[in-house]
């Protein structure tokens, strides 16, 4: 994709910025920052957004972020005083405000889907968009988002329905996009819109179901109740959507879509706050999420979902290098994951999250795989479970199954802001299958989506080396070493719980050829 503005051409495929015919040099991190600001120019980008997207959630100083913003401004002829193109909004964030025209295909991944659209699945398909928060209090945003997430989960349990994952639906949060365009970009027939109003002890949920092909409204209604009735109100929305799409659906299947996660509204409130932090994807937000989940567990010791997602937070910490005492955190992840399964062996989200934590953080591949398989049996629309299963198949030495599962995860969530993790999984699957060119292509795609995602850089270095491209391998390793200075061939087994000795050897040989010391 090429973005044209003020005489500049910003090419995300070539990773080039040109001022007329002249190439403007840019550091990789500054390029990624500018790319993120341009692609999200329709809204204000917060500092937390930048930390998650550019620094992969790591804490950085205010001066470091300011220097990168200033470098981006300098590259495009702007200054901190003028702010013609990149504006700073005090205590809010930054916004790219120049008039931009686009050339070429639309960006892949978290920002946008292909302009020609995705093919419709063979079964009915739906995306539930973020509901507007009508409470007049921005602090209640987490509550409105939580309502939508629970409705998505309820609909996902229906095997005859194809449901887009939360992370892709929420790519439209705060944006005014024509419903027909959303249908094309997500590849769905139906779109559910709505709003939530929470005032004192009362809740109002409104919803309308739209045919994305024609724009026609199929159903609209309003549901009012007390706060303690919130689960019943969610069920009413879900049942009405189901009834509009498949009027003759058996009542029993509607009942199966109804699940009360907890009897404690206070525990539920802390859980929603925790999920809001999880979706921020930063190191600080991960710590805050764990606090919220532990508080939810304190209020309701039988809250399976809180245990499962808390376990998953520990796996996330390991991926992103947040771990302090690895043995202690692995033991806690194992405790939380197993307790989630003991409490509710029918909670797909808890099983999936706990299963991935067991496989990756604890290195218990057999139990982790079993938990995730049950989650998929319970909820075949759970993108998180397909993604987790794909990675666990990589660990188990089943690369073909890994490719299939990761690709299905991407179809369920084509706009996922974390889609680079699926790209990374595909890179390793192809690497262990001996398809080095494919491995490098997926690794580089992951790197373009998130330059600080180090697993992709490791896969690229190994893949290029094994394919005989020594210069590219050494270049990837040179990028990696300053960011991961303790990495050695001897400690690779701590990073990935690989079962097959041949996969360990292949990865070790590739990185050793690239120049990684033993």
Image (cartoon, rainbow, N blue to C red):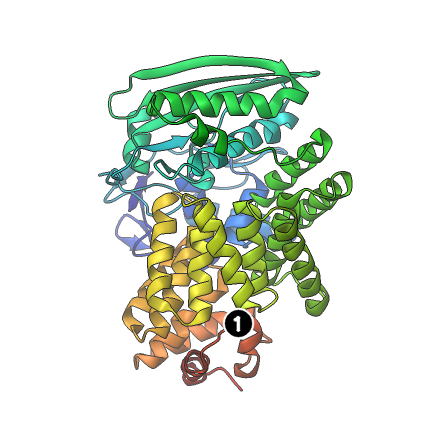
> Which residue is pictured at 22% across the width and 39% down the height?
116
Using a 10 Å C-alpha cutoff, classify the residue at mark 1 as few (fewer than 14 neighbours), some (14 to 19) or many (20 or more).
many
User: What residue is shown at x 54% (from left), y 43% (from top)?
Assistant: 49
Q: Position of residue 410 (x, y in %)?
A: 37, 49
Name the residue furthest right. 298
- Residue 69 lies left or right of residue 420; in this view the side is right
Kindly tell me whether residue 449 is visible in this rendering.
Answer: yes
Residue 10, how many percent across, how many down?
A: 33, 48
Q: Residue at x 37, y 15 (%)?
A: 219
| Residue highlighted by disc 1 | 497
Question: Residue 244: where, in percent of width, then height?
Answer: 36, 20
Quadrant housing residue 512 = bottom left
| Residue 124 versus residue 208 in the image, above or below | below
Q: Residue at x 38, y 39 (%)?
A: 159
Front one among 491 and 461: 491
Would you say 497 lies left or right of 190 here? right
């Amino acid at each position: 994709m090429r973005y044209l503005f003020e005489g500049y051409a910003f090419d995300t495929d070539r990773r080039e910025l040109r001022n007329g015919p002249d190439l403007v040099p840019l550091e990789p991190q500054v390029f990624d920052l500018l790319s993120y600001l341009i692609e999200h120019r329709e809204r204000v980008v917060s500092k937390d957004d930048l930390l998650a997207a550019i620094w992969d959630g790591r804490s950085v100083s205010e001066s470091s972020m300011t220097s990168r913003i200033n470098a981006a401004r300098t590259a495009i002829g702007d200054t901190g005083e003028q702010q013609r193109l990149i504006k700073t909004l005090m205590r809010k964030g930054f916004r790219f405000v120049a008039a931009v025209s686009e050339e070429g295909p639309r960006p892949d991944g978290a920002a946008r889907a292909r302009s020609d659209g995705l093919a419709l699945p063979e079964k009915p398909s739906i995306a539930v968009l973020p509901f507007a928060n009508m409470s007049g209090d921005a602090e209640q945003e987490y509550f409105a988002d939580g309502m939508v997430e629970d409705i998505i989960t309820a609909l996902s349990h229906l095997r005859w329905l194809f449901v887009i994952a939360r992370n892709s639906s929420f790519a439209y949060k705060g944006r005014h996009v024509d419903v027909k365009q959303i249908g094309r970009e997500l590849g769905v027939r139906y779109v559910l819109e709505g709003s939530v109003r929470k005032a004192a002890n009362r809740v109002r949920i409104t919803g309308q179901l739209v045919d994305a092909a024609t724009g026609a409204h199929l159903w609209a209604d309003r549901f009012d109740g007390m706060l303690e009735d919130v689960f019943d109100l969610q069920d009413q929305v879900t049942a009405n959507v189901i009834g509009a799409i498949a009027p003759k659906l058996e009542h029993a299947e509607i009942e199966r879509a109804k699940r009360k996660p907890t009897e404690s509204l206070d525990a539920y409130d802390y859980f929603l706050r925790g999920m809001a932090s999880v979706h921020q994807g930063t190191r600080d937000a991960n710590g805050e999420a764990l606090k919220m989940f532990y508080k939810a567990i304190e209020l309701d010791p039988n809250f399976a979902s809180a245990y499962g997602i808390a376990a998953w937070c520990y796996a996330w910490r390991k991926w992103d290098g947040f771990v302090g005492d690895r043995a202690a955190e692995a033991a806690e992840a194992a405790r939380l994951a197993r307790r989630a399964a003991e409490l509710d062996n029918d909670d797909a989200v808890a099983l999936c999250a706990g299963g991935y934590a067991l496989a990756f953080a604890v290195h218990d591949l057999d139990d982790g795989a079993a938990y995730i398989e049950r989650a998929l049996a319970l909820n075949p629309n759970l993108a998180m479970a397909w993604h987790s299963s794909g990675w666990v198949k990589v660990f188990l030495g089943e690369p073909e199954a890994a490719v299939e599962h990761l690709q299905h995860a991407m179809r369920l969530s084509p706009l996922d802001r974390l889609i680079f993790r699926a790209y990374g999984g595909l890179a390793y699957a192809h690497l262990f299958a001996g398809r080095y060119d494919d491995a490098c292509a997926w690794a580089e795609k992951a790197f373009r989506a998130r330059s600080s995602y180090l697993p992709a850089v490791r896969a690229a270095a190994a893949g290029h080396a094994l394919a005989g491209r020594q210069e590219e391998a050494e270049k990837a390793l040179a990028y990696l070493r300053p960011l991961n200075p303790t990495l050695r061939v001897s400690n690779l087994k701590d990073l990935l719980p690989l079962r097959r000795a041949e996969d360990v050897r292949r990865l070790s040989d590739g990185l050793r050829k690239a120049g990684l010391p033993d």
